[in-house]
Amino acid sequence: MTGRTSSTVTDSTLADRSDETVEIQRPREKGPWLLEIASPEASEVVHLDAGRELVLGSGPAADLRLSDPAVSARHCAVRLGEAGVEVSDLGSKNGVRLGAARLASLLCCGDGTSFVIGETSVTIRRRQDAGDDDGDDDEPSIPNLVGRSLAMQRVRREIARHARTRAAVLIQGESGTGKDVVAQALHALSGRTGAYVPLNAGAFPDSLADAELFGHRRGAYTGAVTGRSGAFELAHRGTLFLDEVGELTPAVQVKLLRVVEDGAVRPIGASDSVRVDVRLVAASWARLDERIRDGSFRADLFHRLSTATIELPPLRRRKNDIPALSRVLLLRLRDDVGEKRLTGAALARLLEYAWPGNVRELSAVLYRSAVAAPGSEIDAGHVALPEDARVVSVRTRASPERALELLGEHRGNVSAASRAAGVPRSTFRAWLARSEKEAQNVPNTASPPEADVAQGTTATSGDGAASRAVSPVFGAVVK
C-alpha cells in the first residue's frame, strides 16, 4: 500500500474521497483485534489474524459472506498489518463509507473505528478478554435487550448470571442507556411471582418519601380516607426498581437503609411493621463511589445496594448496535412516520456521532430524520445531528439548586437543560419542582392527600397490566 495519500477525517468531510487512503489519527494500540459486523439480518464477531487478508462480500468468493444486498460480491478487504488494521475497497458499487466520506482505503490504528459497506456496519475493536471472540450460540436470550456488540454480550451474561439470585443489583450507566430495560429483564428472568414496581427516586421530595416507599393507613393524616400500599408492599415477592437512587437525600437514605437491613416497613399511621420479600434493583447515572467521597451518599447503603453491579456501556462504545437499534426504533415509529429504512450513507452519518444522549437521543434523531424523508428511505441529507458532537460528561456534578439557573441559561428548554445537567428529564423536572417550592417558601406540614402521594409508583402484574397513579409534581396520570 505504497504511494498513498494520508489525511485526517473531520465532521466537515463531505467530498467523495474514493482515490485516497484515510488514516485515523489516534494513539496506536496493540491488538489482538476483532471485527464487530452488523448486517441487516445478522451480526457476528470475527477474530483478525496478523498478516491474513479477510475479504468481506455477499458472493461465494468472499471469506466472510454477508446477507446484505447492498454489499458487492467482493466488497472490501480487511488486513491486520504492522501499522494497524487496513481496509481496502475492491471496486465495490457502494464503496467504503466513513462518516460522510466514501474512501478507497482506510488505515486504523485505534479501537472503536466504524465504517459502513452497503447497509452493514463494521467496527474495529481491540480484544479485551478471552471470551470476546467466542461465538454467541450459547448467549442467553434477554427480553427487549437490543444489540449483539461485545459490550452488550457482556451485559447479557451479567443479567443471566444475577437474574435468579436474591442479591441486590446496582445498574450504573449514563442517562439513556437503558437501565430500566435491564431492570425489567432481571425481573422477567428471576422467577419471582410478585410485581415489578418502578419508582423514580429522584422525583419525590422528602415529605413524600415515607408515603411513596412505605405507604399509609386510613386516617393517617387529613384526607387519607383510604389506605395505600407503598412501593415495598406493592413489590412483595417481586422486584422494586429504584431509578436515580443517587438523587435520594441523606434523610431518605437513612430510611431506605433501615428497610433494606430489616426487611420490614411500617406504613404511616400503622403501629406494627410489615415483613416484605423484595428483590431490590437500583440504578444511577451518577457514579455512587464519587458521591460517597464527596459525602452526599452513604457508604453503608451503597454496599447494601451493590451486592452485584452491572455497568451499561454508552452508545458510543457500542456503535455496532446502531443498525439493530435503528430498525427496532423505526418499527416503533411506524404508525407515526410510516415504513422507513436507513441507507448506507445515513447509517454512516449515525456512526460518526458521539451520542451523548445515548439510545434516547438516537430515537429522537431517527424520528426527525424519518419526518424529513419524503419517501421510504432515510438518506444522509435527512439526518440532522447537533453541531456540537462532543460527549457530555455525566461526571459534571449538577444539583437541584442550579435547576432554575440551568433552565434560564437554555431559554426554558427542559430537554437542553437536563442534557447540560447530565440527568434524565424526569429527574430535572423534579429538581425544578423542588426549586420552585423552596423559592415560594411553602412550609411542609401535613402529608398531602392520597391523590398526591401516589406519584412514581406503578406496579406491573404478571400479565403486563399497570395500575395508574397521579403525579403530584406534574398533575399527570402516570401509566
Image: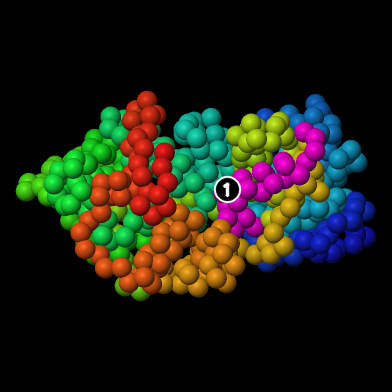
At 26% from the left and 60% from the top, the residue drawn is 207
Q: Quick check: 173 above or below 410? A: above
**Residue 10 place in picture, x, y as percent:** 78, 63
- Note whether 355 is above or below 182 in the view shown: below
Nearer the observer, 454 or 402: 454
Residue 472 seen in this snapshot = yes
Mark 1 residue element: helix
Instruction: Using the image, determine if residue 15 lies above or below residue 136.
Output: below
Q: Residues within 10 Å of mark 1 (few under 14, many from 20)?
A: many
Amino acid under disc 1: Val
Magenta residue span = 354-376
Q: Which residue lies at the image location 33% right of the left edge and 44% below the top edge?
A: 457
Magenta run includes residue 369: yes
Look at the image and tell me in which quarter the C terminus lies.
top left
> Could you tell whether 78 is left or right of 41 in the image?
right
| Residue 347 visible, this angle | no
Q: Residue at x 34, y 28 (%)?
A: 462
Q: Quadrant of residue 108?
A: bottom right
Name the residue furthest left: 271
Residue 121 among those drawn in magenta:
no
Of residues 175 and 324, the one nearer the viewer is 175
On-image quarter of the N terminus: bottom right
